[in-house]
Amino acid sequence: MIQNANIKSSFDLKLIRDQFPILHQEVNGKDLVYFDNAATTQKPKRVIEALNKYYEVDNANIHRGAHALADRSTRYFEHTRASICQFINSPSEDQIIFTKGTTDGINLVAATFGRANIKKGDSIIISHMEHHSNIVPWQMLCEATGATLKVIKVTASGELDMNSFDELLDKSVKLVSIVHASNALGTINPVEEIIQKAHQIGAKVLLDGAQSASHLLVDVHALDCDFYVCSAHKLYGPTGVGFLYGKRELLEEMPPYQGGGEMIKEVDFAGTTYNTIPFKFEAGTPNIGDVIAFNEAIQFINELGKDAIMSHENELLAYATEGMESIPGVRLIGTAAKKVSVLSFLIEGMHPFDVGMMLDARGIAVRTGHHCTQPLMKLFNIEGTVRASFAVYNTKNEIDTLLEGVAKLAKMKQSV
Ligand code: C6P
């Protein structure tokens, strides 16, 4: 594995930024300020180098060949599984299933656990702040089975209305699928309480960890969630890779997702028997190179330490929130008491897309639009927001650049 001697446990922003080649460029004649981290984070050199090394030195299919390269690739691939296991405190490695990402993980659970356990008369609870990936698969399942989809209300500050959750929770509920941290609002949801209450009535809980895995300490064992899904690309890793964690007894009972190589024990025209977990859910040749490179992203986070990362990101969020609140004409969308480093806002009288374009002209990359949460935007009666989301390599100077840009736009709008 590629080692990185530069990053030690100390938190040195310059050293951290030096690990990210992409950050050191100009966009529209200005230094790039990358604040679209909730969409995807940038990748440290060690991830890029691991990907190159895999194709230059190790490339072979895994779990199949009897030769040295196949053995090496298999070991590196499985090493990432072991790292993820540790990263989220899974009781064992075979409870980690590689997927294409969060969306794929949720669809896997809907198509397997959902199809096997949810029927007409049953219900599934989600919330009004879900990403489309945690709405549509359940709508499809409900259409196919006759089950009902129930939705937890969201308050004006962008928090879950827990009274509404209590009211929805009855014996018909078989699954609660909830976002751990909202991509559009930043809200950190009270998942411990949700899991505990859901379990009391025998319902299972899936956590959409797309926005929590990089920002929060995630301990699936302590949380006692039944499923946890996330994407590597939001965790400083490559695109096209993610994982699903599941409780052993559920994964073992669930039917396979896709049929093909690797997921079988024995194939016969009289009938096929399936492999054990995790391979039962990993049909076909996986994204080997990216899985191997993902391990470097996890080590990058581990070496910095989640506590140090969270403390830095919280400081950035507090600084940016205070700055935005002091700009006349700016409205924050999502003011929950507990948030990850996501700041959604609007400038009075300006379309979010125009704000995004004008910030881009200053080298600032933000995301604008509905952030794949259209029901949430409808609830707030808005088309979308401007979203700045911060990662470990962002600085207060960069936030000053954003605040200066936003203040200029807000002032310009107010003077017309
Ligand atoms: N949100 C954003 O800009 P995939 O695309 O499968 O890696 O992740 C889907 C997904 C699911 N849940 C949440 C909470 C998410 O934030 C995302 C991805 C990106 O907010 C792209 S829309």
Image: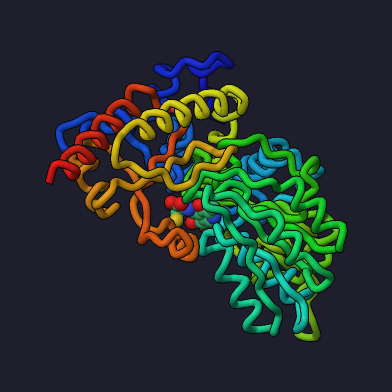
In percent of the image, x 69 and y 84: which residue is there?
146
Image colouring: rainbow
Residue 240 seen from this side: no
Residue in view at x 40 percent, y 58 percent: 370
- The image position of residue 148, as x and y in percent, is 68, 77
Q: Tell me where residue 107 appears, x and y as whole percent.
A: 61, 67
Q: Is residue 288 left or right of residue 17?
A: right
Residue 212 higher or lower than 392, as above or below? below
Question: Residue 59 location, x and y as percent?
Answer: 51, 46
Residue drawn at point x = 55 percent, y = 34 percent: 296
Point out residue 23 in the picture as x, y percentages from the top left corner: 33, 31
Asked if residue 264 lies left or right of residue 330, the reply is right
**Residue at image coords 69%, 63%:** 281
Q: Quadrant of residue 199?
A: bottom right
Q: How many marks?
A: 0
Quadrant of the rendered structure where residue 303 is? top right
Residue 191 seen in the figure: yes
